[in-house]
Image (tube, helix red, strand yellow):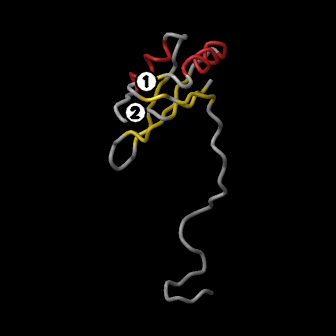
Amino acid sequence: MNIYVGNLSYEATDATIREAFESFGEVTSAKVIKDKYTGQSRGFGFVEMPAPAQAQAAIKSLNGKDLLGKPISVNEARPRADQGKTGGGRMGYSGRGKRY
């Protein structure tokens, strides 16, 4: 099960969140999401646990608990919604104020 962990302290690392969840069972992966330009934490991450019962126990126990001085938000991760983007740029715009 993939678990979303939000409201993380900027000091939180992959190891920090892994340790918090390992007390509930096996952790397949733990990742704090970082800004691709600055490398700073974006304040959330994901944890994968193979056993659904252990994952549910972790969600129930850790949601709202303090981690590095901040109450974390923990719930089952939702799949990314397809946002329907097909490409970049503005189609039909020449850059001179006219639309074709």
Q: Is residue 18 above or below residue 39?
A: above
Where is residue 7 shown, x and y percent of the image? Answer: 48, 35
In the rendered image, residue 87, in percent from the top left (x then y), is placed at: 58, 63
Q: How crowded is mark 2: few (under 14 residues within 10 Å), some or many (20 or more)?
A: some
The label shown at residue 67 is 1
Residue type of the residue flagged with mark 2: Ser
Residue shown at the point (57%, 16%) measured from the top left? 61
Say above or below: 53 vs 34.
above
Query: Which quadrant would residue 67 be assigned to in this image?
Result: top left
Q: Quadrant of residue 3?
A: top right
Q: Earlier in the sequence, mark 1 or mark 2?
A: 2
Q: Are marks 1 and 2 in contact (CB under 8 Å)?
A: yes
Residue 78 horizontal side relative to residue 68, left or right: right
Name the amino acid, label 1.
Answer: Leu
Quadrant location, the C terminus: bottom right
Residue ID at (66%, 13%)? 53
Which quadrant is home to the N terminus?
top right
**Which residue carries the number 2 mark?**
9
Q: Which residue is drawn at 53% across and 70% down?
A: 89
Label 1 packing within 10 angstroms: few (<14), some (14-19), many (20+): some
Q: Position of residue 44 (x, y in %)?
A: 48, 36
Residue 77 location, x and y as percent?
A: 62, 32
- Where 88 falls versus 58 (above or below)? below
